[in-house]
Amino acid sequence: MTTVSPVSDAYAKGKAFTEATNPGMEDALSNRYGAVLPGLARDLVELNGRIYPRGVLDNKTRELLTISALTALGGQTKPQLKIHVAAARKLGLSQQEISEAIYQMSLYGGMPAMFNALNAAMEVFAAEEETS
Amino acid sequence: MTTVSPVSDAYAKGKAFTEATNPGMEDALSNRYGAVLPGLARDLVELNGRIYPRGVLDNKTRELLTISALTALGGQTKPQLKIHVAAARKLGLSQQEISEAIYQMSLYGGMPAMFNALNAAMEVFAAEEETS
Amino acid sequence: MTTVSPVSDAYAKGKAFTEATNPGMEDALSNRYGAVLPGLARDLVELNGRIYPRGVLDNKTRELLTISALTALGGQTKPQLKIHVAAARKLGLSQQEISEAIYQMSLYGGMPAMFNALNAAMEVFAAEEETS
Amino acid sequence: MTTVSPVSDAYAKGKAFTEATNPGMEDALSNRYGAVLPGLARDLVELNGRIYPRGVLDNKTRELLTISALTALGGQTKPQLKIHVAAARKLGLSQQEISEAIYQMSLYGGMPAMFNALNAAMEVFAAEEETS
Amino acid sequence: MTTVSPVSDAYAKGKAFTEATNPGMEDALSNRYGAVLPGLARDLVELNGRIYPRGVLDNKTRELLTISALTALGGQTKPQLKIHVAAARKLGLSQQEISEAIYQMSLYGGMPAMFNALNAAMEVFAAEEETS
Amino acid sequence: MTTVSPVSDAYAKGKAFTEATNPGMEDALSNRYGAVLPGLARDLVELNGRIYPRGVLDNKTRELLTISALTALGGQTKPQLKIHVAAARKLGLSQQEISEAIYQMSLYGGMPAMFNALNAAMEVFAAEEETS
C-alpha cells in the first residue's frame, strides 16, 4: 500500500534540500563528527530527504513548523533554531512571519520558551544586517 | 512604537476565532472552571484574540504551527491536540496536511512524540467518518 | 560546614510527613514495587524526610510549589499531581489556592499543561464531594 | 458566573506589579521587540496583570511558585529564572527561601534541573553583594 | 571518511532487528498509518536499521538505553516504553535489570517520570505471567 | 520484604562511587552550596550511594544509561552531561561507546537533543587530548 523512495532518491532529495537551506551541511557534519560517528552526516542528509520533500506541504510552511516546534521545546534548541531561522530566511520567509510563529508559541510552550526563541531569531536577523 | 488593540477588540476577535474553530468554547470553559477560576474562560478567548488574528500568517498556517508544537511537546498534550486537529479540519486543512506536519516532528521531538500525536489525530479523523 | 541529619532522623521525619499527607504510602509502595525494586519504598520515605522537613518554608507552601512544578512539567504527571493535590487539601489548602497556583503556570508551562493539571485537580475536588 | 476585569484594569494592575518587581520591563521589551512584534510588550504587562493580582495567593508565594516551575522545566529557563529570583528578592523573600524552593524540585524535575536553577539563583545572589 | 550503508542494507538490518524485537511491526504500522502517511512504516524499519545494528554497543545495552531515555522523558511515552520493555525481555534482559534502569532515572528525570515508567514496565511484566 | 541499607552504608558506598568517578565532588559541592543549602552535598553523595551500587547493572552500563537520559532530556543538561561523560571515561568506556549511546537518542529525543549532547561530549573528549 505504501510507496517507497529508494535511498539514492532520498539522499539526492535531501542533498538538494539541505544545500538550498543550509549549504555545506554534510561536509561540515562529516568533518566534525565523522571520527566518532561515521555515517551520521550522510544519515542526516538522507533523513531530511525523507521528510521535507514529501510534498503536501511546501518548504516554507515546513520551515515554520520546525521553528514553532523548536520554540515550544525550549531555549536549549537555540543552535538548531538559529539554523532553521536562517534556512527560513533563505526560502523567503520574512522576519515578521518567523517572529509571529514564535510569538504564537507563548500559548503552548510558555513565555520563557517564546522569549528564548525570539532572542535566538533576533541574533540571526541582526547578523543579516551586518552582512548586507 | 507599538500599536495596541483595546481589550474589547481582542475579546471580539478572539470570540470570532474561537467560535469559528471551536464553537461554544467560552461557555464550556466557564461552566467547567468558573467556580474555581472565575475569569479563565474569558481570559482564554481574549488571549486567542491577541494571537491568532494578528495577521502576517493566515489561520490555516497558524493551526498547523500549533499542531506541530503540541506534537513536539509530547503525547501529554493529547486533549489539546485533538481540539486543534478538529479546528484545523474546520479551517479546511486536509488529513494529509495535518499528518505531514506531525510526521515532520519526528526529527525534532522524537518518534514517541510523533506517534502519540499521530494516534490522537487519527482519533479525530475516525470521528469525522462516523459523523459524515 | 554543613549540618547533617542521620538517616534514622530523615526516615522518621519522612515517615511523619508522608503519614500526614499520604497515609499508608510506604506500605503501598513496598507491596507494589518491593519485588522488583527492594528498598524503593523506604528510600522514598527517607527522601521526603530529607526535603520537606528542612524548615525555612512551611509544608503548605512546599505542597503548592510541588503542584506548580508538576503542572508546568505537563499532564503526564497526572498521577503524582493528584496525590499532591490531595496532600495539599489535607494540609488545609483551599481548592481556590490550588487552582490559582495551577492557573499561574499557564504563563510558564503553556495552556495545555495548565488545563491538564486543572482537570486532574478537579478530579480530586470531585472525589472530596463524593466522600463528604 | 465569571467576574471579568476590563483591560484597562488588567493593564494597570500588571503595570503596578511589573514596576514593583521588574522596573522598566515594558519599555525594555518594547524597545527590544517592538519592531518585529508590535504589541508584545503591552500584552505581557497585561498578562501579568491578569494572573498575579488575582488574589487568593500573595505575591511572595506566587513568585516562589514561578521559581519552582522554572526550575523543574530545566536550565534553559535561566534568563527568566534570574528575573524572577531578582523579583522574589525585591518582594522580600530570603536567599534561603528561594534556595529551598529550588532544592525541593530535585524530587520532581531531577538533579540536573535543580543544579542549573541553583546556579542561576546564585548568580543573582552574587550580584546583590556586588551592588550592596 | 564516513562509511555508509546502502539503503537496502539498512532496511534489511532494520527488518531483522525489528522482527526479532517487535515481530510484525512494519505490517502493523503500514496497515494503521499507510493511508495518511505512505512510507512511514518502511522509513521506521530502515531508521532502526541505521541505528541499532551499528555495533560498538550490543542490542541488550541499546534497549536499556532506550528504556532509560523514555523514562526520563516522562510518562507520556508509555506506549513506546511498553514496546521497548517487551523488546528488552525478548532480548533476555531480566525484570530486575529493566527496573533498575528505570529506578536510576529518578535522579535525572524526577520521581514522577520514574514511577510512571515503572508502572508501564510492570504492566508488561504482568502480561508475561498471564501468557506463561 | 525490602532489605534496607542503613545510611552510613549508603553514604560510604556513595562516597566510594563519587570519588571513583568524580573526585572531590562532595567538598566542591559543600564549598559552593553549603551556605544556602546546608546538607545538599552530603545528601547527593548518599543519594548516589543508594542508586549506583545497587548491583544488577554494572557501573559502566549505569553511566551509559545516565548519558542517554541526559541526552534525551535536551541540551540544558550540558553541565551534568559533561560530568557523566568524564565519569564514563574514567570507568573505561570508549569515546565511540559514549557517542553511539548519544546518537541512538536521536530517535527518542529528536535531532536537536542529540546534537547538543554530542557537542558536549566532544568538549570532554577534546579536553582529554589536551591533558594527555
Image (tube, coloured by chain):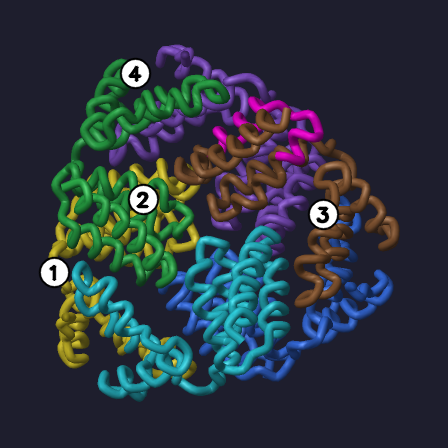
Chain colours: A blue, B cyan, C green, D yellow, E brown, F purple
Whole-Å distance between the Cαs marked 2 and 4? 27 Å
Q: Which residue is mark 1?
A: D55
Gap in angstroms between the C-alphas marked 3 and 1 = 54 Å
Quadrant assignment for the C terminus of chain E? top right
Majority secondary structure of the magenta segment? helix
Above-or-below relation of C10 to A128: above
Question: At label 4, which amino acid type do we have?
Answer: Val
Q: Residue at x 25, y 70 (%)?
A: B41
Subunit of label 4: C
In the rendered image, residue A2, in percent from the top left (x then y), is placed at 77, 64
Q: Position of residue B51 (x, y in %)?
A: 37, 78
Tell me whether the residue at label 3 lies in contact with that at label 4, contact meaning CB atoms closer than 8 angstroms: no
Whole-Å distance between the Cαs marked 1 and 2? 23 Å
Circles 3 and 1, Cβ within 8 Å, touching? The answer is no
Circle nearer the viewer, 3 or 1: 3
Q: Judging from the image, what secondary structure is the residue with disc 2 in?
A: helix
Disc 1 versus disc 2: nearer the observer: 2
Q: Foreground mark, 2 or 4?
A: 2
Mark 1, residues whose alpha carbon is within 10 Å: few (<14), some, or many (≥20)?
few
Type of the residue with mark 3: Met
Q: Earlier in the sequence, mark 2 or mark 4?
A: 4
Question: How many angstroms separate mark 1 from mark 4 (CA)?
Answer: 40 Å
What is the three-letter code of the residue carrying label 1? Answer: Gly
Look at mark 2 in the image and give the residue it sits on.
C81
Per the rendering, the mark at residue E25 is 3
Residue depth check, mark 1 versus mark 4: number of the one nearer the observer: 1
